[in-house]
Amino acid sequence: MSWTPHATVAVVVETDGQFLMVEEGREEARVFNQPAGHVEENESLIDAARREALEETGWQVEPTEFLGLYTWKAPANGVTYYRFCFVAKAVEQVTTELDPDIVAAHWLSYDALLARAESLRSPLVMQCIDDYRQGRRWPLDVIRELQAEPSNQA
């Protein structure tokens, strides 16, 4: 059996005490999450974070710092997720069209998120926000994404 971890990105975007969140439909229930999703083939982590935020919220965001790498094994499906989480600033809302799985994008306070604790997609949601609120930050250049050099072999 082959183990295949899932590489994902997420962004914590905070403006005036409000966090940019998505409400999504999951298995007959609605849950809240940061803008987040899977990294696509040949996509950099930072580009994936920008793309996911735009697709899920309609907001153009710019990652400013790396918050951390989080791992979580989902009990429902046994999948291990590697979440590369970024701090990002909101640049502008450029569309109101959202991914089909997204019900709505919301700006929510920390207290509003705590009140929805049972409706968070995973424990990663509050862990990332708590780490952000505690000042955890790394420069973006802590991530090294090297491109493969062309092979000289025929």
Image (cartoon, rainbow, N blue to C red):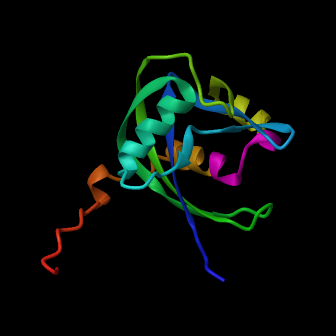
Q: Quadrant of the N terminus?
A: bottom right
Magenta residues: mostly which secondary structure?
helix
Taking the spot 49% from the left edge, 17% from the top edge, the residue there is: 95
Taking the spot 44% from the left edge, 42% from the top edge, the residue there is: 49
* Total residue callouts: 0
- Give the image location of residue 101, x and y in percent: 68, 34
Query: In this view, which residue lies farthest toward the front?
Result: 154
Decide: is 78 above or below 41. Answer: below
- Give the image location of residue 133, x and y in percent: 53, 42
Query: In this view, which residue lies farthest toward the right?
Result: 28
Q: Is residue 83 rendered to the left or right of residue 114?
A: left
Is residue 147 at all visible to an observer of this figure?
yes
Decide: is 150 above or below 65. Answer: below
Is residue 17 at all visible to an observer of this figure?
no
Q: Nearer the viewer, residue 45 or 18?
A: 45
Judge whether residue 118 is colored magenta: yes
**Residue range highlighted in magenta:** 117-126
- Give the image location of residue 154, x and y in percent: 16, 79
Q: Nearer the viewer, residue 133 or 90?
A: 90
Judge whether residue 34 is colored magenta: no
- Give the image location of residue 89, x and y in percent: 40, 30
Q: Is residue 62 rendered to the left or right of residue 93?
A: left
